[in-house]
Image (spheres, rainbow, N blue to C red):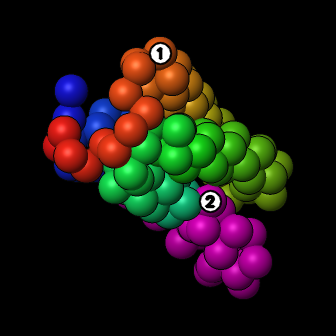
Amino acid sequence: MFHTFEEIEAWKEARALANVSRIFLKRAREQHDYGWADQLSRALLSIMANIAEGNDAKTNAEFIGFLGYAKRSAAESRSHFYFGLDAGYITEEEFAEASKRAQKIGAQLAKLMTYLHSTSNTAMRMATL
């Protein structure tokens, strides 16, 4: 298992996705599309932040809630990737990689949510960490 959010594989993958995305976010900003760049940046950062915040939750149920927000942010990011592709900010290759990573994050989060839901420990999480 893990103790810190930095040990969670989905968080590591979300961090990598955010870093890879900087390339096409820069392209959008150069074209003065600050709105799209800001929306995508927020969605990507939301994945990481919700995983981190959830890891400090007091119960598994609360943690699952935060992971759900992170999972939805991964889906939102994928949707933004389509716009970036259509607008010419993202190449086909970059789109394929980014979309695949976002799907992987979603699957990792779903698996972690299922695991946490199946454990009987819905009491205080921090006591065991």
The vertical placement of 25 against 129, above or below, is below
Instruction: Write the residue at 31% across / 34% down.
Output: 9
Query: As rendered, which of 8 and 103 lies closer to the eye?
Result: 8
Instruction: Tell me the quadrant of the picture where the C terminus can be found.
Output: top left
Q: Is residue 119 visible?
A: yes
Mark 2 crowd level (few <14, some 14–19, many ≥20, 10 Å Cα): many
Q: Position of residue 72 (x, y in %)?
A: 68, 44
Instruction: Write the residue at 55% across / 60% down.
Output: 46
Label 2 is placed on what type of residue?
A: Ala
By secondary structure, the bulk of the magenta-drawn segment is best described as helix
Using the numbered discs, state the Cα–Cα distance from disc 2 to disc 1 in whole angstroms: 28 Å
Disc 2 or disc 1, which is closer to the eye?
Answer: 1
Toward which corner of the image does residue 87 lie, by quadrant? bottom right
The residue that label 1 is drawn on is: 118
Return the mark for residue 43: 2
Q: Which residues are magenta?
A: 18-43
Q: Secondary structure at mark 2?
A: helix
Label 1 is placed on what type of residue?
A: Ser
Q: Position of residue 16 (x, y in %)?
A: 36, 47
